[in-house]
Amino acid sequence: MKELLLIFESFDTETGKYYSDFAEKAPSKPAVDEGAAKKLWQLDVYTDDVIITEANSIDLLKAAHKYEFEGLLRKCQNYLYQETNIYNSCSIFSRGRRLELSSLTEKTPDFIVDSADDVFKTEGFLKLSNDDLYTLLSGEHICAFEEEIITAAIKWPRNKCTQEMVKTNGQTMRQAFGPVIYTLRIPLLSLERYSDIVVKSRILSEEEELGLYKYFTMSKKNVPKIFVDLIKVRVTVFRFSLQQRTFSKRGKWKTYMTS
């Protein structure tokens, strides 16, 4: 019941407001004991009076899931995907995956990939887990240029190293990336952007760096047709895909919201 206590110690029954560390401080009031918290919780559930806000939605979702309050859980899920925006979409997606809530894990990713050029610039994107990052970046439909995807993705391991107080360099960033690095379609960059973005980050091995450089230079030189044809039929270069992603917005999120 600890989650309930934390929630209701921050809930003012007179104003109907929820106070958190990110909001104004609640007026001082006596601590709520476990029994009182449970009664207040049941009152809110059964009288349908609970007020879901951006500040309390995740806490209520977690508690409702843990204590199996199906009605409130459903309301929290509906609230979250109705209120999804570029700033909170990644945290909603991550929470949905951890709690195995299909209404969030199946729908929120469509918003993220359709708004990727904006979502990938947010702090929420940097806070994704490695698994969540892999899930999003391995998709074929991302509404952002590959250069934007790679630029944003490289910031993720740098932020992770900083958060874990690990020395930030190419080696530690590569370790933080893990298999996620192979979701980046580096061969789709120009040679100039490859040098400016990827090579400078030092996330590639020497073999990968040299091999990709050869790929870029060979594709631009006047080489025998047989070699050009070989390049065209390749699907990867050092496990990095050559396949273009689908850039156009699919509009699935709008469909979900009106269904």
Image (spheres, rainbow, N blue to C red):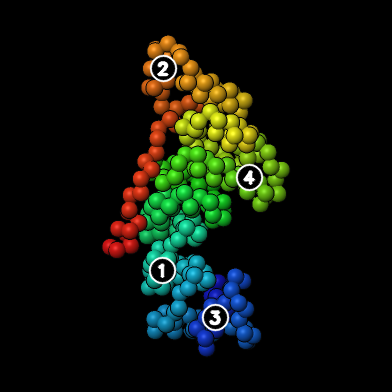
Residue at image coords 48%, 80% = 41
The mark lying in front, picked from 3 and 4, is: 4
The mark lying in front, picked from 1 and 2, is: 2
Separation of residues labelled 4 and 2 (CA atoms): 36 Å
The mark lying in front, picked from 3 and 1, is: 1
Confirm whether residue 77 shows in the render. Answer: no
Q: Residues within 10 Å of mark 1 (few under 14, many from 20)?
A: some
Separation of residues labelled 1 and 2 (CA atoms): 53 Å
Question: On the image, numbered disc 3 is attached to which residue?
Answer: 11
Residue at image coords 55%, 42% = 151
Query: What mark, if any, has residue 79 been given in the picture?
Result: 1
Separation of residues labelled 4 and 1 (CA atoms): 33 Å
Q: Earlier in the sequence, mark 3 or mark 4?
A: 3
Amino acid type at circle 2 is: Val
Q: Determine the secondary structure under disc 3.
A: strand
Q: Earlier in the sequence, mark 3 or mark 2?
A: 3
Residue at image coords 51%, 24% = 216
Q: Nearer the viewer, residue 100 or 200?
A: 200
Separation of residues labelled 3 and 1 (CA atoms): 19 Å
